[in-house]
Image (cartoon, grey):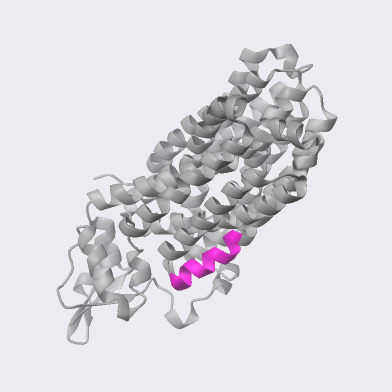
């Protein structure tokens, strides 16, 4: 019988290495060298659609604040606690679902996370106070936080190495697309149907997607390789991915780390400690800045004297720039590696400081403000969206999900801080300029974090 090693670091050379009377075959190398089949397109499409739905529901909350503020009789800054508990829920979900995904599988934890998020997003429509909004937002956040690390790990472990960074970045930029969908949907739903119906739509769509994911989405082949009792399921997945393997193969998991030593503690030991610290810092600054902007742009623009239409389209402009930035970053990352991302953060710093020297946002005019937000969206999202791909590249299969989960969880601390920071800025700065000063500081932190990171994704070598 042939031993098939999932994720064998020896690559193609493993085909020539004798193990007793058999040959050890690196199926990780087979996956990397295998085709990009229809199955991978389906997996990517399903995960992207799910993330778009989650991004829509998550970012729609910020757009609904002016309407909710009027209905509930609360000032906009009173919603800081709702944002904070929402991000706290994201942290709880991320920390919990990452290890659960490593233990029970990416697919079941992903489905459970989406279900929890959908149900409590629907429940937001029933909220009648800041307290009930906070409770439902926290519980919805747990589901949303659990979805991303497992979705990322699943697509990473089904994609060939030559496409892995690109598909993870595509999945990540779907959050931005979801924000754009949310901005458009909110502009159509809020004036006519109210904020309650916005949350009903936002929760019903991912709820409807769950059965489709259950029947079509496969489990990660690298996860399945760790359990000999799941060989038939692994074989079906490999067949679906059009991967060839010996008919009597004995699938095992090996990535250069002794199986008995596999533990999340390795994140904080050599050779991973420095990169873990750098990734945590990068996620902290990136998520603090990203959520600060997408959560508070409408409120900051309204406070600076712009009407509701401009406030809504400001978020659309930011997310539109984010879409361009994420796609551009993905293409540049594949060709030049992930170190190129610092160029985007430096450009964002320069733009933010330049705008911060104006007398007010109103003095710039709505057209200039839209262009600035578009440019800032390009910069911020180009730095943020590839971070999941970098984290996936940094850690091996055995603790990839928990590594991504903990990095995201630390990033949620930055998101929680952005809740109160946004409330303070929107209340104290009627000119709207302080938000750009904050953006410059957080982008500087992102740049330093990327410089500290050692395991950057290398350029893809083309034959």
Q: Residue furthest left?
A: 247
Question: In terms of depth relative to the viewer, which is nearer, 449 or 294?
Answer: 294
Question: In terms of depth relative to the viewer, which is nearer, 351 or 286?
Answer: 286
Side (left or right) of 396 relative to 17: right
Please tell me which residue is depicted at 68% across the width and 55% down the height of the picture.
88
Please tell me which residue is depicted at 47% across the width and 48% down the height of the picture.
206
**Residue 334 appears in which quarter of the rendering?**
top left
Q: Which image quarter is the N terminus in? A: bottom left
Which residues make up the magenta segment? 93-104
Specify the principal SS of the magenta part. helix
> Is 85 above or below relative to 255?
above
> Is 446 above or below relative to 376?
below
Number of marks in the image? Answer: 0
Viewer can see residue 203: yes
Viewer can see residue 432: no
**Residue 146 appears in which quarter of the rendering?**
bottom right
Please tell me which residue is depicted at 33% across the width and 73% down the height of the picture.
225
Side (left or right) of 221 relative to 150: left
Q: Position of residue 114 (x, y in %)?
A: 49, 55
> Is 143 above or below relative to 354?
below
Q: Position of residue 120 (x, y in %)?
A: 59, 52
> Is 236 above or below relative to 414?
below
Q: Which image quarter is the C terminus in? A: top left
Q: Position of residue 178 (x, y in %)?
A: 50, 38
Question: In terms of depth relative to the viewer, which is nearer, 192 or 285?
Answer: 192
Please tell me which residue is depicted at 55% across the width and 72% down the height of the picture.
264
């Amino acid at each position: 019988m042939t031993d098939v090693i999932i994720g064998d670091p020896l690559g193609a050379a493993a085909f020539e290495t004798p193990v007793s009377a058999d040959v050890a075959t690196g199926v990780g190398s087979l996956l990397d060298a295998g085709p990009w089949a229809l199955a991978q397109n389906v997996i990517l499409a399903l995960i992207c659609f799910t993330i778009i739905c989650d991004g829509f529901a998550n970012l729609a909350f910020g757009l609904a604040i002016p309407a909710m503020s009027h209905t509930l009789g609360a000032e906009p800054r009173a919603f800081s606690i709702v944002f904070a508990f929402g991000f706290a829920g994201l942290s709880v979900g991320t920390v919990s679902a990452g290890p659960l995904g490593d233990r029970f599988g990416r697919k079941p934890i992903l489905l459970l996370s989406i279900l929890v998020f959908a149900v409590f997003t629907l429940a937001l429509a029933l909220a009648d106070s800041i307290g009930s909004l906070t409770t439902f937002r926290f519980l919805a956040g747990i589901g949303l936080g659990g979805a991303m690390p497992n979705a990322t790990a699943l697509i990473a472990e089904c994609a060939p190495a030559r496409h892995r960074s690109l598909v993870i970045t595509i999945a990540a930029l779907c959050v931005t697309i979801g924000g754009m969908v949310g901005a458009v949907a909110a502009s159509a739903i809020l004036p006519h149907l109210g904020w309650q119906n916005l949350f009903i739509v936002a929760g019903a769509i991912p709820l409807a997607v769950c059965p489709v994911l259950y029947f079509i989405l496969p489990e990660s082949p690298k996860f399945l390789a760790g359990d000999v009792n799941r060989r038939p399921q692994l074989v079906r997945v490999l067949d679906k991915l059009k991967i060839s393997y010996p008919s009597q193969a004995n699938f095992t998991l090996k990535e250069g780390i002794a199986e008995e030593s596999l533990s999340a503690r390795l994140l904080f030991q050599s050779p991973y400690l420095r990169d873990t610290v750098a990734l945590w810092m990068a996620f902290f600054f990136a998520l603090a800045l990203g959520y600060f902007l997408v959560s508070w742009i409408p409120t900051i623009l309204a406070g600076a004297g712009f009407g509701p239409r401009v406030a809504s389209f400001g978020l659309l402009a930011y997310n539109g720039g984010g879409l361009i930035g994420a796609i551009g970053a993905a293409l540049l990352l594949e060709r030049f590696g992930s170190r190129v991302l610092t160029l985007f953060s430096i450009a964002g710093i320069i733009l933010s400081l330049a705008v911060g020297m104006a007398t007010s946002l109103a003095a710039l005019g709505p057209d200039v403000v839209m262009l600035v937000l578009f440019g800032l969206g390009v910069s911020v999202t180009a730095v943020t969206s590839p971070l999941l791909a970098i984290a996936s590249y940094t850690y091996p299969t055995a603790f990839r999900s928990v590594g991504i989960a903990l990095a995201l969880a630390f990033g949620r601390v930055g998101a929680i801080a952005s809740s109160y920071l946004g409330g303070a800025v929107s209340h104290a700065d009627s000119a709207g300029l302080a938000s750009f000063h904050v953006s410059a500081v957080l982008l500087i932190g992102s740049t330093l974090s990327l410089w500290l990171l050692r395991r950057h994704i290398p350029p893809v070598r083309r034959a």
